Each structure stands twice: as structure tokens, then as C-alpha cells.
């Protein structure tokens, strides 16, 4: 397996704790432990190994998101990253199917890991039609084949903030089912919709579906490192459990316990309301800035998530722009080239309302200069 550098993660790891203003962050302002639980209540938690696929209470709570599911349809992982990794690792063993179709633009972990596992990668694109980012179903139809092991999507989408509609998900599910392919649906931003309407889940539109998710984005607790995979096939969940035996073995006892608190109904609803409130308030700041700089930017407003993709009118490439912003303005952004989207940048707006307008203005200053 030849490692492909994960450029986006590396630039964030190098600079996110160094720069004055981080606009590369893709989540919302994290919760503090005291907002979840009385810290005194944690004193007697036994810090041993947990059930390695996640405790039954936690998996049961997670499964409530998926119609007809129970704890046997869910495996808990260390973040959405492990969920995506073991899913691709498992599917790459199918010797008669050596191709994966990946929706782009996208968070590039599945793309990178599939390549390292020797799968042929093909892209089908979300395209800017002037009003929204819409999936190109005809491109998907033209590229899928009996050699396709899986179709990988991200909904709500990273980096665009787009939400696919039910009819689009249904079409993707039908196309995949017709060819015997799995659908991997990364739904990390489900719950962060600005209009307050929960986005549809691929769970409802495909039989051979693997939904991956995490508490890191909409739930604002990335430090817990809790993710999960949900599948209608309990046999597939058993297979994936065997793979996590070789990776992280088990989630931490403390994280498993706190994640169950996150999923309690009142806490769950409170966190989602908080996330949407932060995003709506901060987006107003971003919209004002975009209006003031409409001569140098074009964009489609995000429907969900704490990020959006913006195209700039300048000859500088996005990686050079990111380096310039770090060096001259102490601002970190995510270059569009790290999503195979040249002349774009991904901006995060879920943090630090006081620093957001300052960071945005510094970006405009550099581009105008």
C-alpha cells in the first residue's frame, strides 16, 4: 500500500494552532465538558476497555436515526475517519470489483484511501448550476459498471455545504442497486442545516448502504473521537467489526459514556439547535462580506455544514494563496486544490464570531492586492 499524503489534514495540523485566525476549521465551536455533564458524575467511571464495537446503550441510541435499525446494525468507531477507512478497506477485498466511484468535490479521505488500496477511482461531480450544487446523475450512469464496488457520496457535502434532495439520493440508490454496488454515504454534517429541516439520509434509499457519521461536526464534540457505521446488513457490520480489531480495537470508555449522553433526546436536540443557531448567526456576517466583495468572489450559499466553497477572481493558485495568507495575515484557509477545485477556497464559519469578520477582510485584502 503506497501512502498518498493527505494534504488538507497536513496543512491544518501544521498551522491551525499557530495562526491568529483559523478559517479552515470545518466544525462549529466545540462544547465544553461542563455543558454535557457535571464533572463530578464522571469520578466513578471505570476506565477499562469498553465493548469493542461500542456499548449496547450507545449503539441503540445511534440506531434510532435509521428506520428499522437496532444496535446490531451499528458499529462505533474512533471518529468518522476510522469509519470511512475500515469501510473502504473492507470493500477493497472484493477481487471481482476493483473500481470505486466517488462524488467530487468531497472530503478526500475516501478518495485517497481507495487509491492506496489499489482501487481504480472515478469521479462524478456536483456541478454549480448557478443556483445550487447539483449531482450529475448522467455522469454517474455513464461511469458505473459491474466492476464498481461502491459509490461514495458526502451529504451534506464537504466542501460545498450542499444538500442532496431525496429524489437525487433515490436515483443514486437505484443506480447502485442495479449494478450490485454499495453506497458509502458520509453524513457527518447531517443536523447542521441552516433552514432547520433535517437532510435526508441515504439509509432510506439503498439496500446495500453503509452510512458513516461522527460527533465531530454537527454535534460539536470532535474531542470525543466517536464515529459510527450503520448498515442494513448485519453481516457487513460483523465484518467491519473484525477490521476495527486491527485498528483502534475499541472506543475509549469515557468517550463512549459521554457520547451516550449526547444522544439523549433533550441533549441531542439542544446541541443541534445550538449548532444551527451558530451557523445562522455567523452566516449573516459572511453574507455581508460577500456582498461587499462581490466583484472578486462567486459562490453558492451553503444549505448545511459550517463550511462553503467560494471561487475567487485572481490568477494565484489556491495553495499559494493559502501560504500567502498564513505568512502575511496569520489566517488559515483550506485551498480548493486540496479538493481538486482550483481557484476555489473552502471557508469555515462555525467558530469565533468576533474573529470571523477580521479574517474574512484579510482574505479580501490579499486578493485585491
Image (spheres, rainbow, N blue to C red):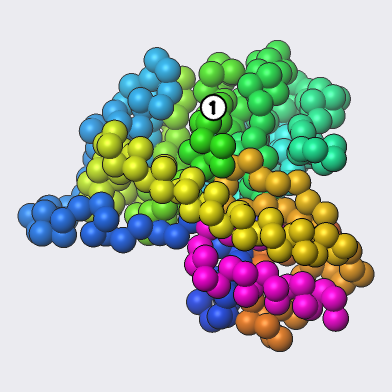
Query: Residue 154, located in which quarter of the rendered image?
Result: top right
Q: Is residue 119 visible?
A: yes
Residue toward you, 83 or 13: 13
Residue placed at 72% from the left, 53% from the top? Answer: 309
Residue at image x 27%, y 55%? 35
In-front residue for pair 3/364: 364
Report which residue position mark 1 lands on.
201
Where's residue 75, x and y in %? 38, 35
- Which element type, helix, strand or loop, lies under badge 1? loop
* Residue at 34%, 39% in the rendered image: 268
Give the farthest residue toward the bottom. Answer: 328
Q: At 44% from the left edge and 29% from the top edge, which residue is drawn? A: 230
- The answer to whether residue 277 is above or below residue 54 is below
Q: Quadrant of residue 25?
A: bottom right
**26 is higher (above) or lower (below) than 330:** above
- Residue 336 versus residue 46: which sits nearer the camera? 336
Where 132 sits versus 46, above or below? above
> Does residue 358 belong to the magenta stretch?
yes
Look at the image and say whether residue 154 sits in the magenta stretch.
Answer: no
The reply to whether residue 120 is in sight is no
Occupied quadrant, residue 359: bottom right
For the image shown, how many numbered marks are present on the structure?
1
Q: Position of residue 87 (x, y in %)?
A: 53, 38
Residue 219 drawn at (x, y percent): 41, 47
Residue 87 is left or right of residue 328, and the answer is left
10 up-or-down from 106: above or below: below
Q: Which residues are magenta?
A: 345-369
Amino acid at each position: 500500500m503506497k501512502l498518498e499524503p493527505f494534504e488538507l489534514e497536513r496543512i491544518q495540523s501544521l498551522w491551525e494552532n499557530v495562526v491568529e485566525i483559523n478559517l479552515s476549521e470545518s466544525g462549529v465551536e466545540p462544547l465544553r465538558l461542563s455543558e454535557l455533564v457535571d464533572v463530578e458524575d464522571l469520578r466513578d467511571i471505570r476506565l477499562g476497555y469498553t465493548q469493542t464495537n461500542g456499548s449496547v446503550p450507545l449503539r441503540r441510541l445511534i440506531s434510532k436515526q435509521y428506520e428499522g435499525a437496532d444496535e446490531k446494525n451499528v458499529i462505533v468507531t474512533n471518529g468518522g475517519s476510522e469509519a470511512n477507512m475500515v469501510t473502504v478497506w473492507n470493500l477493497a477485498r472484493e477481487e471481482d470489483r476493483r473500481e470505486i466511484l466517488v462524488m467530487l468535490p468531497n472530503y478526500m479521505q475516501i478518495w485517497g484511501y481507495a487509491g492506496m488500496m489499489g482501487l481504480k477511482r472515478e469521479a462524478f461531480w456536483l456541478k454549480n448550476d448557478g443556483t445550487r450544487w447539483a449531482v450529475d446523475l448522467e455522469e454517474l450512469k455513464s461511469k458505473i459498471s459491474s466492476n464498481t464496488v461502491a459509490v461514495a457520496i458526502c451529504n451534506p457535502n464537504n466542501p460545498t455545504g450542499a444538500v442532496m434532495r431525496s429524489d437525487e439520493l433515490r436515483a443514486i440508490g437505484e443506480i447502485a442497486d442495479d449494478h450490485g454496488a454499495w453506497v458509502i454515504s458520509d453524513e457527518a454534517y447531517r443536523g447542521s442545516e441552516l433552514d432547520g429541516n433535517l437532510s435526508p439520509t441515504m439509509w432510506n434509499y439503498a439496500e446495500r448502504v453503509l452510512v458513516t457519521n461522527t460527533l465531530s461536526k454537527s454535534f460539536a464534540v470532535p474531542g470525543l473521537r466517536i464515529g459510527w457505521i450503520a448498515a442494513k446488513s448485519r453481516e457487513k457490520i460483523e465484518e467491519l467489526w473484525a477490521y476495527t480489531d486491527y485498528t483502534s480495537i475499541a472506543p475509549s470508555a469515557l468517550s463512549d459514556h459521554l457520547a451516550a449522553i449526547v444522544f439523549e433526546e433533550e441533549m441531542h436536540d439542544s446541541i443541534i439547535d445550538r449548532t444551527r443557531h451558530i451557523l445562522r448567526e455567523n452566516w449573516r456576517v459572511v453574507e455581508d462580506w460577500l456582498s461587499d466583495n462581490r466583484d472578486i468572489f462567486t459562490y453558492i450559499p451553503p444549505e448545511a455544514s459550517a463550511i462553503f466553497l467560494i471561487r475567487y477572481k485572481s490568477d494565484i493558485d489556491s495553495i499559494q494563496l493559502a501560504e500567502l495568507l498564513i505568512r502575511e495575515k496569520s489566517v488559515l484557509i483550506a485551498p480548493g486544490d486540496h479538493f481538486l477545485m482550483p481557484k476555489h477556497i473552502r471557508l469555515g464559519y462555525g467558530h469565533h464570531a468576533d474573529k470571523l469578520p477580521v479574517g474574512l477582510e484579510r482574505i479580501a485584502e490579499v486578493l485585491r492586492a
